[in-house]
Image: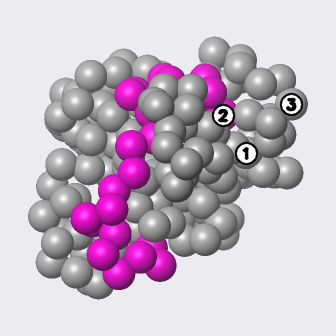
Amino acid sequence: MSKFFTDPHLKFEKSLHGLTSEEINTFIPQDFSGKNFFIEFYEHFNGGYFYGGAFIYRDNFYKIEDNDYNLMEIESFNFIPINDVDSPYLLSVSDVLKYRCNVSKAFLDFSQLHIPFAGDAGDSDYWINLETGKIKYTKSTDIDCLNNIIDIAPSFRDFCTNIQSQRR
């Protein structure tokens, strides 16, 4: 697991069987920066749950102002639903997309270039931009969340390798 998460104390569980690169590319055909690492991850783990919690700090990548979010919590990675697979523990990428797009037409437009691959315990989402590979966050309790998108990490690899089991 250290190739994907560098903190040896992370407990990543409840993952479904990994997918083939063909299955991943069929579901997400766009070629974005860092997609190879994304594919490797989903070949090993089709989603997963962080038992005991997981965190990432935005100041690992960006200059943070006093009122900015820095510490971010991650509860789980969403799974890619291939062959009608389901999980009692995890959300699927498709279910999150359906739910968000039913709430707002703006989310429908946003989802054309973003995939929700992870979430926190507050029903908010981490998205990967399908052109740049950058990781974004939307807070579901924020009515104007698409005007308040938070940059989290420059890439999926940066996101994964900077997740930690403890707060600073």
Sequence-wise first label, 2 or 3:
3
The residue singled out by tag 2 in the image is: 163
The residue singled out by tag 3 in the image is: 9
The residue nearer to you, when weighing 86 against 147, is 147
Image coordinates of residue 71 in percent, x first then y, are: 64, 47
The residue singled out by tag 1 in the image is: 54
> Real-space Cα distance between discs 2 and 3?
11 Å
Sequence-wise first label, 2 or 1:
1
Position above or below: 14 against 34: below
In what element is the residue under mark 1? loop
Quick one: quadrant of the N terminus?
Answer: top right
Position above or below: 135 against 61: below
Quick one: quadrant of the C terminus?
Answer: top right
Residue furthest out toward the front: 66
Q: Residue at x 13, y 64 (%)?
A: 109
In what element is the residue under mark 2? loop
Q: Residue at x 65, y 66 (%)?
A: 121
Q: Is residue 26 left or right of residue 43?
A: left
